[in-house]
Image (cartoon, rainbow, N blue to C red):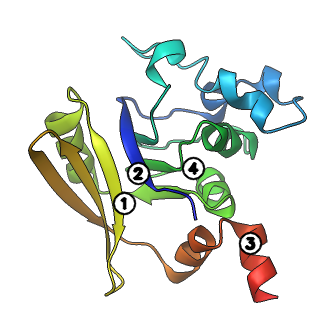
């Protein structure tokens, strides 16, 4: 199973679309790995530099409607080959969200108040994220910056959890059928 956590990249903007996640001009690449250097290349965000800000990040925390725009598997693939298996947002474009889970990755939806608190409390700090699954079926995102730590609960339905545990749809189907 993938590691769901690590250093956080805060992207303080709503409506980050699939063309900003991976520009369309790279959709002709024949391997997922070929997408790696182009992740977030066209994202316009004050103070953000994809060449220096993405390296070493394992989790993205952002605002609303992440993954909107054209439906394509390439957007989650570009995140995956960069080791980013978790995106936390208020909500996601429906197809993008499902593509994340189909790849065995997590698109975690949080209420606006929690997202706002994450940005207010942690976005200006070196922050680590841990996704915790409890035995009672609950789950939480735990953010840690030095001695500061906060947890935010979220829901993960049984099918999404099964996709994550099986490294995506193909692993799920192999184990189930």
State the quadrant of the N terminus.
bottom right
Instruction: Choose top left, top right, bottom left or bottom right for residue 131.
Output: bottom left
- Mark nearest the camera among 2 and 4 is 2
Residues under labels 1 and 3: Cα distance? 21 Å
Query: Hey, which residue is sitting farthest left in the picture?
Result: 147
Q: Which residue is mark 1?
A: 131
Residues under labels 3 and 2: Cα distance? 21 Å
SS category of the residue bearing label 1: strand
SS category of the residue bearing label 2: strand
Q: Earlier in the sequence, mark 1 or mark 4?
A: 4
167 or 96: nearer the viewer: 167
Q: Is residue 21 above or below residue 154?
A: above
- Mark nearest the camera among 1 and 4 is 1
Residues under labels 2 and 4: Cα distance? 22 Å
Q: Which residue is mark 4?
A: 93
Q: Earlier in the sequence, mark 3 or mark 4?
A: 4
Residue 61 is labelled as none
Q: Examine the rendering and report whether any part of residue 65 can be seen.
A: yes
Residues under labels 2 and 1: Cα distance? 6 Å
Residue 26 position within the rendered picture, expressed as x and y whole percent measured from the top left: 80, 24
């Amino acid at each position: 199973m993938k590691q769901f956590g690590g250093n956080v990249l805060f992207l303080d903007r709503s409506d980050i679309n699939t063309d900003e996640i991976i520009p369309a001009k790279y959709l002709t690449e024949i391997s997922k790995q070929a997408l790696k250097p182009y992740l977030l290349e066209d994202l316009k965000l004050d103070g953000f530099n994809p060449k220096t800000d993405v390296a070493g990040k394992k989790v993205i925390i952002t605002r609303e409607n992440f993954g909107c725009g054209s439906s394509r598997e390439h957007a989650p693939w570009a995140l995956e080959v960069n080791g980013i298996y978790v995106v936390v947002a208020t909500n996601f474009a429906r197809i993008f969200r499902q593509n994340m889970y189909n790849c065995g990755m997590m698109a975690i939806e949080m209420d606006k108040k929690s997202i706002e608190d994450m940005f207010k409390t942690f976005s200006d700090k070196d922050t680590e994220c841990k996704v915790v699954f409890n035995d009672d079926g609950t789950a939480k995102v735990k953010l840690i910056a030095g001695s500061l730590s906060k947890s935010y609960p979220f829901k993960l339905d049984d099918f999404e959890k099964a996709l994550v545990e099986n490294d995506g749809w193909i692993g799920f189907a192999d184990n189930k059928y």
